[in-house]
Amino acid sequence: NAGVTQTPKFQVLKTGQSMTLQCAQDMNHNSMYWYRQDPGMGLRLIYYSASEGTTDKGEVPNGYNVSRLNKREFSLRLESAAPSQTSVYFCASSEGGRGAYNEQFFGPGTRLTVL
Amino acid sequence: DAKTTQPTSMDCAEGRAANLPCNHSTISGNEYVYWYRQIHSQGPQYIIHGLKNNETNEMASLIITEDRKSSTLILPHATLRDTAVYYCIVRASLSSGSARQLTFGSGTQLTVLP
């Protein structure tokens, strides 16, 4: 199993450009998440999807859109990139559903620089 | 979810036990304590979680005080590869069909010294 995969690993954009970050998981998990991590800080949730067909805003959703394409895939789109969106983006997944044990599995991250 | 307080950084000698404290004095009865770590440039990794009782797995032990207002993560024999930022997170259990995000603070930078 590959776990959680993310593409691309690195990306440089100019202000105003758009792009989509891709995430896929092969663990048959119901829930998926997008976080961003700025230098020296903890992760902050952008959007999450509790189950296929649903998405909800997290702590810092402005400037982003998401699509839960199917159970495996959850993409994050920047419509008009800004320098403030320079960050490392992590995708995660978890089983979801009832219960306390809901370990989140994280991908390797996408390092995005907006000039 | 309750707020947590952790020291900014700690050092530990290789082969010794690393004891990482976490204060969560406002924790409520249905909230669990989770620990994750993030090795430089990688995605966070789950370590352990607990509610009331002490827990142990192949990676670490979690000691929760009787009043549940603080906890300690113990890495029994720290190695250089344990150098990472360790996050203590308090979160309620899930309700059916919902997802609960993890709220990461700044964590503790643990440096294992040779």
Image: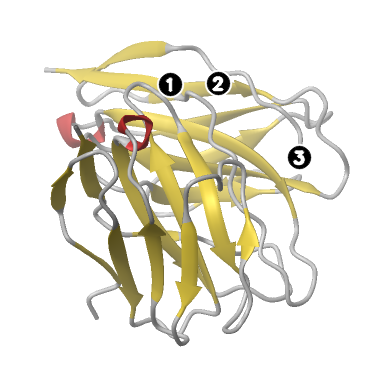
* Sequence-earlier tag: 3 or 2: 3
The picture places residue B102, in percent across and down from the top left corner, at: 58, 47
**Label 3, label 2: how far apart the Cα atoms are:** 18 Å
Q: Quadrant of the N terminus of chain B?
A: top right
How many marks the image carries: the answer is: 3
Disc 3: CA contacts within 10 A as few (<14), some (14-19) or many (>=20) = some
The picture places residue A78, in percent across and down from the top left corner, at: 37, 54
**Which chain contains the residue that carries disc 1?**
B
Q: Quadrant of residue A53?
A: bottom right
Q: Amino acid at mark 1?
A: Thr
Tags 1 and 3 touching, CB below 8 Å: no
- State the scheme by which the image is colored: secondary structure
Compare residues B4 and B19 and report the one nearer the observer.
Answer: B4
Q: Amino acid at mark 3?
A: Asp
* Sequence-earlier tag: 1 or 3: 3
Is residue A37 visible in the rendered image? The answer is: yes
Q: Residue at x 83, y 26 (%)?
A: B26
Q: Amino acid at mark 2?
A: Pro
Reading the image, the residue beneath label 3 is B1
A98 sits to left or right of B106: right
Compare residues A6 and B58 and report the one nearer the observer.
Answer: A6
A54 w.r.t. B85: above or below: below
Task: Say which mark, if any, is on residue B21.
Answer: 2
Q: Single out the mark in the foreground, 3 or 2.
A: 3
